[in-house]
Structures are given as structure tokens and as C-alpha cells.
Amino acid sequence: AKPGSKEAYNLIGNLYFTSFDDCKQEKSQVEDRAIFIAAHDMYKKAGNSSQMAAAKAQFPSTEDIFNEGKQEGDEMTIGCWINTTIKLAKRD
């Protein structure tokens, strides 16, 4: 009801975070874990630092990103019901 509401961003972050099992395709660790980057982005808008940390802990590792020939900062599109674009980030 209130555009830009921190509660709304937090709720969206929670929905993204808990959608991992439903949305993962198990073909790419980086693509599957990108959902947590989208959740982190929503938690950041909500100002929820504890959930930002929880989401970041689930980001792909430096090794996963390297092994898949990707780089931090690459744009990726998350499918499933989320359908958004994120910038690739690593947890470590």
C-alpha cells in the first residue's frame, strides 16, 4: 500500500530468500545462488543488515564464479517467478 516501504522490501527479500529450493535448477551453483543476491538487494533497500548478512553468506564463492568463467559484476538474469537482473557478487 505504501510504495518504497521498508516492510515491503523486507517481505520481497524473504520471498526471494525462501524460493531457492523452488527455483534452483542444479545446473550452475552461480546461477542458483544468484537468488540470494536478489534477496540481499531487497534487504539493503529495507535496511535489514542481519538478513543482508544471511543472504551474503549464501552468495556463490570466488571459486564457483571462476570455475564457471564468470566475473564479479557480471549481470545475470534470475528466472523462475522472480525474473530480475542482478550484478554478480561473491560471498568471500
Image (spheres, helix red, strand yellow):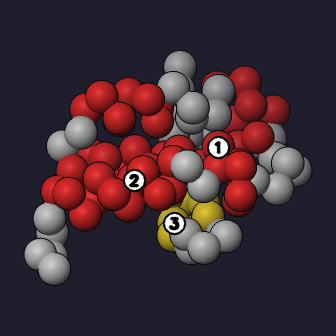
Tell me the CA gap for discs 2 and 3.
14 Å
Question: Horizontal and vertical percent for residue 54?
Answer: 44, 29
Residue located at (24% from left, 39% from top): 48
Q: Are marks 2 and 3 in contact (CB under 8 Å)?
A: no
Which corner quadrant holds the N terminus? bottom left
Question: Sequence order check: which comes first, mark 1 or mark 3?
Answer: 1
Callout 2 amino acid: Gly
Label 1–label 3 contact, CB within 8 A: no
In the rendering, at what x and y percent does residue 73 appear? 50, 47
Q: Which residue is mark 3?
A: 85
Q: CA distance from mark 1 to mark 3?
A: 13 Å
> What residue is shown at x 60% (from left), y 55% (from top)?
19
Q: Is residue 80 left or right of residue 15?
A: right
Residue shown at 30%/28% (left/top)?
A: 50
Q: Is residue 50 at all visible to an observer of this figure?
A: yes
Q: Which mark is drawn over residue 33? A: 1
Q: Amino acid at mark 3?
A: Thr
Q: Relative to 22, is 43 on the left or the right? A: left
Element type at marker 1?
A: helix
Please tell me which residue lies in front, 88 or 23: 23
Q: Position of residue 57 (x, y in %)?
A: 51, 26
**Dot 1: within a 10 Å radius of its alpha carbon, few (fewer than 14), some, or many (20 or more) residues?**
many
